[in-house]
Image: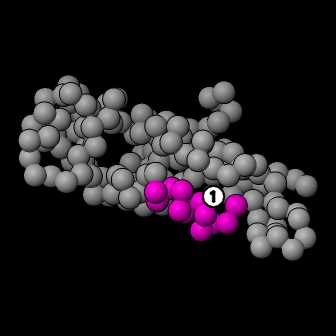
């Protein structure tokens, strides 16, 4: 049975701030993120299996991504933990401040999402690559082959 790549796209709104950055992104601002998740595996070939012919049910993939990423990051603000901005926001009444152990750049976020998703996929299904659009024309990519 041939390996098949399967991709599902997700969208979420998130603000971030790049504290210490030397450009306009040092200010709190938001983006409409688009995340494309591509997995690879062999379609289920067991006769009578309810998922016959599928690598993974799109609904199952959606559940994993929504649980680990979109429900957590949608309408949140991502900041570097223990930074000045984090300390100020921690004392506010904002409900969704995501303090991260890294600067919340598109590059760092896509790698972090890969670390969250890869171990949460079902047996026989592997994370192939992620593409995270921060804007309509700017994105970062993560490929499993580049990160053994």
Q: Nearer the viewer, residue 31 or 54?
A: 54
Tell me, yes or no, whether the highlighted magenta stretch contains residue 15. no
Q: Looking at the image, which is closer to me, 146 or 81?
A: 81
10 Å crowding of disc 1: few (<14), some (14-19), many (20+): some
Residue 84 sits above or below residue 24 on the image: above
Q: Is residue 135 left or right of residue 111?
A: left
Residue 141 in view (yes/no): no
Give the quarter of the image for residue 42.
bottom right
User: Which x, y percent locates residue 64?
Assistant: 54, 56
- Say how the picture is coloured: one colour
Judged left or right of residue 109, residue 41 is: right
- The residue identified by callout 1 is 7
Secondary element at image label 1:
strand
Q: Main secondary structure of the magenta part?
A: helix
Bounds of the magenta segment: 56-67
Q: Residue at x 69, y 45 (%)?
A: 126
> Which image quarter is the N terminus in?
bottom right
Residue shown at 66% from the left, 27% from the top = 148
User: Could you say which is closer to the camera, residue 24 or residue 72?
Assistant: 72
């Amino acid at each position: 049975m041939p390996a098949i790549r399967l991709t599902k796209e997700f969208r979420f709104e998130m603000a971030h701030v790049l504290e210490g950055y030397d450009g306009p992104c040092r200010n709190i601002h938001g983006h409409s993120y688009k995340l494309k998740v591509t997995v690879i595996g062999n379609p289920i070939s067991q006769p009578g299996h309810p998922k016959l012919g599928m690598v993974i049910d799109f609904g199952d993939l959606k559940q994993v991504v929504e649980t680990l990423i979109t429900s957590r990051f949608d309408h949140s603000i991502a900041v570097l933990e223990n930074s000045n901005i984090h300390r100020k926001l921690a004392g506010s009444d904002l409900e969704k401040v995501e303090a991260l152990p890294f600067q919340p750049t598109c590059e760092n976020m896509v790698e972090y999402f890969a670390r969250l998703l890869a171990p949460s996929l079902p047996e026989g299904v592997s994370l192939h690559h992620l593409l995270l659009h921060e804007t309509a024309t700017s994105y970062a990519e993560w490929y499993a082959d580049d990160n053994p």
